[in-house]
Image (cartoon, rainbow, N blue to C red):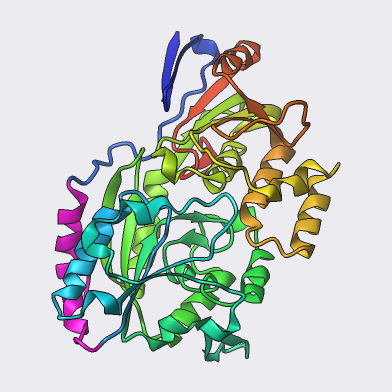
């Protein structure tokens, strides 16, 4: 008999599953020891980057410095504070160190600003607006002749630092490299064009077409400096690497592939997927990724349950799928209406083609509403799904892992 004890915020549940119904799988990030304290490790790696001198040696006091910030990153304040201190040690004043974040998306919380220490509040904080052409500047044209526009701050900067959040991506194969710059900080049409490249076959592959274009743009920008962050279970960070992207990215992707890979014995009737980072870091984006990854391990017409502490308001973009008899029609309409972030809609639609989706979260349920995702209001409802299933798989950190069937990695 297997026991599965889970804490989802204030909610607790313990389920007992017969051995013959339990599908074994090695959890992601097994053996990866969390860095403690993270800030001390960040100070060390930016003083001694890979094949590059200390970051401060690339700076002058007159430089405008831009730090590209991923809003939903574990222990972001513990990463930003030593990086800003390091930049400030080159006599760059705080008011010339700009924290630049991606555009606001529905279902995308921006609580990171409230976690910053007082010492960083003097740094300007800017949210990119892809619709404001006055904030964009022409960088160059790609080898294919495409004109490239980026946020003007990136072009005006004497040095750009990118905090790269390593992980899988259905457009770029992996994220954490130049994809953190382009097309995120370009105009709306550039992002819409890239969303057309969504494909499950891209995930886990390095230097695909989208990645190569982003790499080309990054090099035109003048080789930004990267701090690549490897998130683990819960709120942990198990590695941080610093240097030029070309010196880091391929090896970083390989390290992530080895750590985040989940080898499953066989498909399951029921996959229970959990998000375990802080509630403020959980959003519609993480939920969608969890559904998508769990769908790789569920039987056709099986059930996927995602357990989350996400709260607030679910993105209205989900209505594109709920109102359509065929999910492909909903996606087509969302693309036609230029929905800002098609990625999570595509992930949920893809998962729904494989199995039935259930979500336990802090999102308000709408009584009587039929939708592509069935809300659960109690963990007792999960118990009933377990009792009905012939086989059960538990998938922790589902938003970060990549599942393969045993022998097919």
x 21%, y 74%: residue: 51
Place of residue 371 in the rendered image (x, y in percent of width and height, measured from the top left) = 75, 35
Foreground residue among 65 and 276:
65
Task: Reply above or below: 205 against 221.
Answer: above
Residue at the far right: name it.
Answer: 325
Asked if residue 48 can be seen in this view, the reply is no
Quarter residue 280 falls in: top left
Of 164 and 404, the residue lying toward us: 164
User: Is 46 covered by the magenta stretch?
Assistant: yes
Image quarter of the N terminus: top left
Report x, y in % for residue 172. Answer: 54, 64
Residues in magenta, as a range: 37-62
Residue 117 percent location from the top left of the image: 24, 56
Report if residue 39 is visible in the image: yes
Left or right, 306 with respect to 192, comes to left
- Front-most of 359 and 263? 359
Say left or right for 231 vs 152. Answer: left
In magenta stretch: residue 274: no
Picture quadrant of residue 248: bottom left
Q: Which residue is drawn at 48% across and 59% down?
A: 174
Q: How many labels does the image show?
A: 0
């Amino acid at each position: 008999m297997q026991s599965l004890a889970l804490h989802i915020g204030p909610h607790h549940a313990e389920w007992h599953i017969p051995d013959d119904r339990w599908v074994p799988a090695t959890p992601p990030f097994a053996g990866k020891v969390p860095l403690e304290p993270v800030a001390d490790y960040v100070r060390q790696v930016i003083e001694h980057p890979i094949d590059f001198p200390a970051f401060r040696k690339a700076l002058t006091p007159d430089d405008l410095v831009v730090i590209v910030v991923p809003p939903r990153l574990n222990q972001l304040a513990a990463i930003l504070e030593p990086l800003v201190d390091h930049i400030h040690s080159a006599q760059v004043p705080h008011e010339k160190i700009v924290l630049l974040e991606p555009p606001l998306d529905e279902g995308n919380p921006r609580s990171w600003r409230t976690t910053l220490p007082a010492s960083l509040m003097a740094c300007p904080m800017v949210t990119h607006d892809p619709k404001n052409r006055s904030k964009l500047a022409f960088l160059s044209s790609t080898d294919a002749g495409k004109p490239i526009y980026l946020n003007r701050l990136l072009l005006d900067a004497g040095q750009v630092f990118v905090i790269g959040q390593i992980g899988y991506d259905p457009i770029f194969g992996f994220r954490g490299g130049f994809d953190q710059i382009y097309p995120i900080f370009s105009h709306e049409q550039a992002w819409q064009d890239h969303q057309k490249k969504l494909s499950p076959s891209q995930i886990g592959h390095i230097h695909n077409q989208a990645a190569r274009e982003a790499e080309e743009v990054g090099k035109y920008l003048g080789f930004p400096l990267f701090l690549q962050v490897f998130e683990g279970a819960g709120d942990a960070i198990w590695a941080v690497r610093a240097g030029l992207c070309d010196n880091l990215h391929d090896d970083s992707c390989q390290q992530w592939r080895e750590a985040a890979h989940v080898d499953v014995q066989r498909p399951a009737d029921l996959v229970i997927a959990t998000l375990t980072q802080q509630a403020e870091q959980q959003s519609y984006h993480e939920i969608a990724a969890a559904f998508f990854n769990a769908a790789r391990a569920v039987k056709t017409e099986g059930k996927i349950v995602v357990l989350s502490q996400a709260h607030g308001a679910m993105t209205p973009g989900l209505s594109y799928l709920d109102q359509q008899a065929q999910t492909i029609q909903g996606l087509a309409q969302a693309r036609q209406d230029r929905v800002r972030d098609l990625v999570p809609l595509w992930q949920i639609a893809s998962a729904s083609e494989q199995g039935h989706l259930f979500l336990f979260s802090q999102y308000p349920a709408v009584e009587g509403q039929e939708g592509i995702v069935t809300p659960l209001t109690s963990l007792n409802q999960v118990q009933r799904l377990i009792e009905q299933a012939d086989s059960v798989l538990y998938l922790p950190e589902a938003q970060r892992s990549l599942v393969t069937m045993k022998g097919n990695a």
